Amino acid sequence: MDLDQLWKNTQEELKIVLAPAVFQTFVSQTQLISLKDQTATIACPNSYLVQMNNKRYYDLFKSALDNQTKKNIIINFIDQQPIEIQNSPKKTSTPLFSKNYSTTSYDPNLNPKYTFDNLIVGNSNNFAFAAAQGIIKNPGLSYNPFFIWGGVGVGKTHLMQAIGHQLLKDNPDMKIKYFPAETFGNELVDSLKTKNMTKFKNKYRKLDCILVDDIQFIAGKEYTKEEFFHTFNALHMNGKQIILTSDRKPDEIGQLEDRLVSRFMGGLTVDIQLPDYEMRVAIIKQNTEKKGIKMTNEATLFLAQNIQSNIRDIEGKLQKLFIQSLTDKVGEIDISFIQQQLNINTNDFSQNQDRASMSPRHIISVCAKFFQVKTSDLCGKSRKKDLVQARHITAHFLLDEINLPLEKVGRLLGGRDHTSIMHARDKIHHQLSTNPQTKQLINQIHTLL
């Protein structure tokens, strides 16, 4: 069996065990380039995929290759564009970039602060970041459309605009436009009033890449939805890149027709979570360095433990501390200054530190004991009703108590993919607001942790 056929068979095996989004991001762009002395060399298009495949998916790659070759394979991931992509002919019939374009006459409307240089990558957004690298390598081909969803202030707009900046850096002739969905609707209304629809359509349909923020705001606006549907189709059919953000998944946006939902989910849909503790520390350090704020290391950790919210809130509180430190002529911000300005006490800090130091195994053990099941069963493959509920609640604690990323929770609870853990999280959150028994049960387990 030649290498290409061997790798094709291996990928097909991985496709069965991995979630579609995971396979598309971490496996589909790889290539087996050599197999010598039971050592397989696999090319990945960027260093991030090398790191992630080594860290998270090595065992799955190895198992699939072992099964195909009937040997004990050692895998070496390398940062190299797969040969088939390197040698693939350039498309000439429908070029991705519009060549009759001068960068001086077109405003992409990108915020200069929202670049990859300023983006903190952590457990909450590393999956979306990896997908973004694929788009930069092959705009219009890898993930199209690319749909990013998540709560307020988690960095959706930053990531989307960072892609835009990098695409322009790599392809100066590319026509890119960032705009909120509400702007699209307002301009559409103005064009109808002034009878300038042709100009409006040309403005959006002749772009090479659109970055549309808060697409949920087109819901309920019939003519806006209709026009965006046709704009989406025109761009997608010509291989142009489409990137959308929303505060929820496409199929959870109310008053959105099935035809739009299916198109929005036709590429890659990823979510961005609230930043975990390590990511909050990095965000605080980055902001203090930029503003020239002096803050003790203890104060940085204290702040990261006590602002367990979105990036925007963290930056807002840092701005408040910065301004007040200038007013009070404070040389270096310490814990006492933060306590005074943000009304945080040391008892809260101690409790948060206890939570942060709690191990995943401790949570799993406590939950298994509470539900009177074996730890091996709780972390196993069985889908018995009592085990499923116990597993969902365990996932809730792993996510909410110690901020573990979805993928890690999935690995701990039987090797499940992140979408299964998302489902468990959403189900328990819903039950907490609608079912008093679930709330009581959660409180009982909470006291045992």
Image (tube, rainbow, N blue to C red):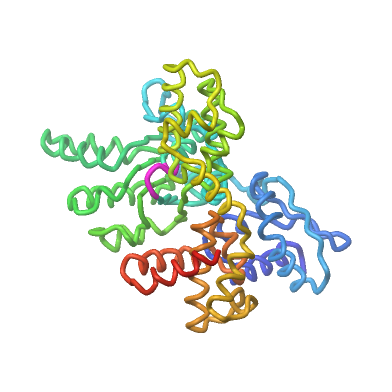
Q: For the N terminus, give its image quadrant.
A: bottom right
Image position of 423 with respect to 209: above or below: below
- Identity of the residue furthest to the bottom in this view: 384
Report the magenta stretch's main SS.
loop
Q: Position of residue 361 (x, y in %)?
A: 64, 65
Q: Position of residue 187 (x, y in %)?
A: 21, 36
- Identity of the residue furthest to the right in this view: 37
Q: Which residues are magenta?
A: 151-156
Q: For the C terminus, give its image quadrant.
A: bottom right
Lateral position of residue 357 relative to residue 75, left or right? left
Lateral position of residue 211 relative to residue 448, left or right? left
Residue situated in front as seen by the camera: 376 or 264: 376
Q: Who's the residue at 70% across and 45% down the image?
A: 80
Where residue 69 sits, quadrant-wise, is bottom right
Q: Is residue 185 rendered magenta in the image?
A: no
Q: Position of residue 275 (x, y in %)?
A: 50, 46
Q: Would residue 271 be visible to someone looking at this image?
A: yes
Q: Would residue 96 be visible to someone looking at this image?
A: no
Image position of 160 with respect to 73: above or below: above
Residue situated in front as seen by the camera: 68 or 155: 155
Where residue 294 sits, quadrant-wise, is top right
Q: Is residue 152 rendered magenta in the image?
A: yes
Q: Position of residue 301 (x, y in %)?
A: 57, 38
Q: Who's the residue at 51% across and 31% down the image?
A: 336
- Identity of the residue furthest to the left in this view: 193
Residue situated in front as seen by the camera: 345 or 354: 345
Q: Who's the residue at 50% across and 46% down the image?
A: 347
Lateral position of residue 205 relative to residue 389, left or right? left
Residue situated in front as seen by the camera: 202 or 324: 324
